[in-house]
Amino acid sequence: MIELDKILPGISAEEYCKSAGTKLEDYEIRGLQIYGRFNDIREIFLKRVPENTEAVIGYRVYSSNLSSESLVVGTALIRKEKSVSRE
């Protein structure tokens, strides 16, 4: 499971790459949307973050006073494996 300090709500992919000294093309980018009960949604979201995710950016929780359900969204940055060239 991803560490909480790697969930970054207020940063763009470009800002993350600049701070990490990487390039956007170094990552596979995968959108995450989880819908569920407000009390359980954070734990469900953390479990659904793909393995090997380096960071989740744009993390947001959307909820309403009219429902106990919430929507959580974010973008997983998954480092691409470097291909080994064979000569």
Image: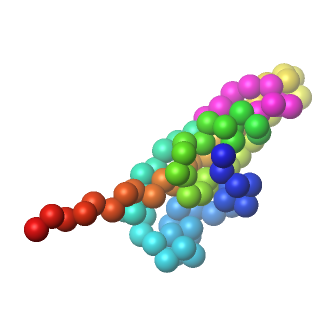
Give the tally of numbered discs: 0
Q: Indicate how the structure is coloured in the image.
A: rainbow
Res. 40 image quadrant: top right
Q: Residue at x 25, y 63 (%)?
A: 84
Q: Residue furthest left?
A: 87
Between 3 and 41, the residue placed more toward the observer is 3
Residue 62 locus on image (x, y percent): 75, 37
Q: Residue at x 84, y 22 (%)?
A: 67
Residue 44 locus on image (x, y percent): 71, 33
Could one spot residue 70 in this view of the protein?
A: yes
Could you tell whether 35 is left or right of 19 in the image? right
In magenta, the rendered stretch is: 33-41
Residue 6 locus on image (x, y percent): 67, 59
The quadrant of the picture occupied by the C terminus is bottom left
Res. 63 image quadrant: top right
Q: Is residue 35 magenta?
A: yes
Q: Is residue 77 magenta?
A: no
Is residue 37 placed above or below 81 in the rendered structure?
Answer: above
Q: Residue at x 66, y 46 (%)?
A: 1
Is residue 15 placed above or below 76 in the rendered structure?
Answer: below
Could you tell whether 66 is left or right of 43 in the image? right
Could you tell whether 44 is left or right of 76 in the image? right
Q: Residue furthest front?
A: 87
Between 29 and 1, the residue placed more toward the observer is 1
Could one spot residue 9 in this view of the protein?
A: no
Residue 32 locus on image (x, y percent): 58, 39
Q: Residue at x 74, y 25 (%)?
A: 36
Q: Residue furthest right?
A: 65
Between 56 and 3, the residue placed more toward the observer is 3
